[in-house]
Image (spheres, grey):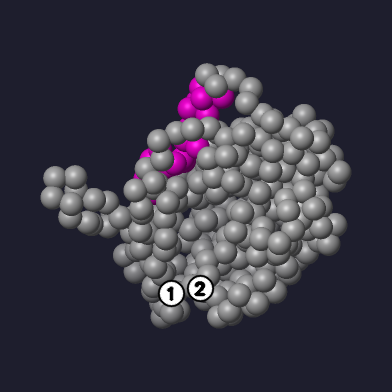
Amino acid sequence: MFDVTAIGELLIDFTQTRNPEDETVSFVQNPGGAPVNVLAALAKFNRKPAFIGKVGNDSFGHFLEQVLIDCGIHTSGLTFSNEIRTTLAFVHLNEEGDRSFSFYRNPGADMMLQTEEVDHEILGQSKIVHFGSLSLTDEPARTATFAAIEQAKVMGKIISFDPNYRRQLWKCEDHAKEMMKKGLLNSDIVKFSEEEFHLLAGEMEFCEGTDYLMKENQLSLLFVTLGNEGCLFRQGKDFGKISGFNVKAVDTTGAGDAFLGGILYKLLEYNVHPSQLKLSEVVEMARFANTVAALSCTKKGGIPSMPALEEVEELLNREGSNENVDV
């Protein structure tokens, strides 16, 4: 039995580092891919995650397979392409630790996942199935992903979605919005960045826009992450903001994934459908997720930055209650 199965991209992040002595820049190899970052956070919290996706049958692909094994992520759903190489992403950081991406994915192996390569036994053994929009940019992975999510819904699984917009990977913004909207219609719980929120809700302010997105897509629970300012949540008529934590950020790569890992961890702990959560549980969930995200920003990389449960609990206990809930 798996707690969460994620379907999507697994790739190499080459993260920028700068030598303080001579200011030379180099790039360090790190495992990456938003869905896998979420699973890595859950594995750190002693949950049982599984992955479905594709990498190249090359040194990078086999390195990534070993990383998943070392993290405690189930890998029987990982397949290898003999024709297409593992996707690479170069992560450029500014002085505040904020990042931009350059992708080598034309094509990349993650785009080549076939419908028949999706292991439905893994889906059937999972409580939650998670996906993002990067597996929706191109065929055949798009069809494979939607087929897997639709099958998981038939099986009665909770569906989690992260729009995870990367402009340079889409043919155009309208196509991205079309695929993201289709993703929303298949989901129960969704996490947006502020950029993704405005991409789909336009100029609506947060209270109105989250209500619109919830009703339009029949979502059960929605979050909008706001960096170090924390996050917004919407569940039915309940809407609020939970303050974040001030930390010295060195790399924000994977912070949103860390947040979502925290959300799914608490959802598993409550053991109810997201529509059945109490307001106090949603607030606690958001505070926990903010803490996970903040701690992930203090380390470099995606998977390597995910904090241990003890670190999260220590920061929560030290900072005490910091929520600002406007219902």
The percent position of residue 297, horizontal first and vertical second, equals 44, 41
Please say whether residue 297 is one of the residues in the magenta stretch.
yes
Task: Please report the residue visible at 41 percent of the width from the left and 40 percent of the height from the top.
Answer: 249
Q: Quadrant of the C terminus?
A: top right
Q: Is residue 16 left or right of residue 297?
A: left
Location of residue 324 with respect to 173 vertically, above or below: above
For the residue carrying disc 1, how many other residues have a C-alpha within 10 Å: few (<14), some (14-19), or many (20+)?
A: some
Task: Please report the residue visible at 41 percent of the width from the left and 63 percent of the height from the top.
Answer: 101
Q: Where does label 1 land, which residue?
A: 105
Task: Please report the residue visible at 36 percent of the width from the left and 63 percent of the height from the top.
Answer: 90
Can residue 255 be seen in the rendering of this structure? yes
The dominant secondary structure in magenta is helix
Disc 1 residue type? Arg
> Is 264 or 225 nearer to us in this picture?
225
Task: Please report the residue visible at 69 percent of the width from the left and 47 percent of the height from the top.
Answer: 223
Location of residue 109 with respect to 251 vertically, above or below: below
Which region is colored magenta? 294-316
Location of residue 128 with respect to 272 vertically, above or below: below
Q: Quadrant of the N terminus?
A: top right
Disc 2 residue type? Leu
What mark, if any, has residue 169 been given in the picture? 2
Q: Is residue 268 left or right of residue 299?
A: right
Can residue 45 be seen in the rendering of this structure? no
